[in-house]
Amino acid sequence: MHTAPATRHWLSAAAPKAAPVAATSTVLVLARIWDANGAEPSFGSAWLMGALATAAAAAGAVSALGHSSHPIITGTAFNACAALTLAEVAAYSDGWSLPLLLWAIATVIAYALAQRHWRVDRRETTTYERRLIEKREDHAHVERVEAMRGQAQITIVREQHAYAASLAAAITARASLPYFNAAALAQAGLPELPSSCITED
């Protein structure tokens, strides 16, 4: 007997969906904390953050256009580029308008990249569940056939035992009658009992 797989908890199912917005929000909060603690724009810091963001974007582009590209590597590279850009602008901006705008853009990009991975994962999950259902149906069919075969064998054995008991009762009743001629009965021949019934009786 097969049991249905356990249903995933709603938190474990919702956690991957909330990961992009949680990541961009964390970067925004940390950058604003850095800004509140005296982050000052400088050419060296801006150049470093810009170079890191450009390198991450280039790595994402190479991974996306390559023959052996992987969605996770590509998404991670582009997400890193967006996070670095968001952190730089949010840390060095005086107000909240530009950081919030970049936070919204980075979140949309993160969800767009994650959607491709989720689609592949959903397709693989659907294929796995379909194969699992097919295997369960095949096993259930085999179990039904074996159960029917066993029931038929049990029925045959019961009929053989009933036949043997009836035959023995008939012979006993006939032997008690007057003028019973056993030699004539033996010459006429009797139906042969099944070997299984003779052994078990």
Image (cartoon, grey):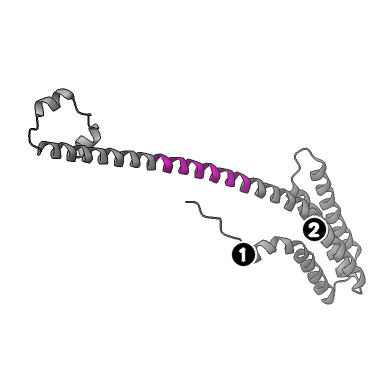
Real-space Cα separation, disc 2 to disc 1, in angstroms: 22 Å
Name the spot of residue 59 as percent of width and height, x first.
81, 48
Closer to viewer: mark 2 or mark 1 = 1
Q: Residue at x 74, y 45 (%)?
A: 70
Name the spot of residue 9 as percent of width and height, x first.
62, 64
> Would residue 116 be found to the left or right of residue 199 on screen?
right
Q: Residue at x 7, y 36 (%)?
A: 178
Q: Amino acid at mark 1?
A: His
| Relative height, residue 18 to residue 176 (above, below) | below
Q: Residue furthest bottom?
A: 36
Query: Contact, CB < 8 Å: mark 2 with mark 1?
Result: no
* Mark 2, other Cα within 10 Å: few <14 / some 14–19 / many ≥20: some
**N-terminal-most mark, 2 or 1:** 1
Is residue 35 among what the camera can see?
A: yes
Name the spot of residue 183 as percent of width and height, x first.
9, 25
| Relative height, residue 158 to residue 181 (above, below) | below
| Relative height, residue 122 to residue 95 (above, below) | above
Q: Amino acid at mark 2?
A: Tyr
Quadrant, the C terminus = top left
Q: Nearer the viewer, residue 58 or 167?
A: 167
Which residue does the numbered mark 1 point to in the structure image? 9
Which residue does the numbered mark 2 point to in the structure image? 111
| Relative height, residue 60 to residue 35 (above, below) | above
Magenta region, residue range: 129-150
* Mark 1, other Cα within 10 Å: few <14 / some 14–19 / many ≥20: few
- Name the main secondary structure of what is drawn in magenta: helix
Q: Residue at x 86, y 53 (%)?
A: 54
Q: In the figure, residue 91 lies in which quadrant? A: bottom right
Describe the element under mark 2 as helix, strand or loop.
Answer: helix
Q: Residue furthest front?
A: 179
Q: Verify whether residue 159 appears in magenta.
A: no
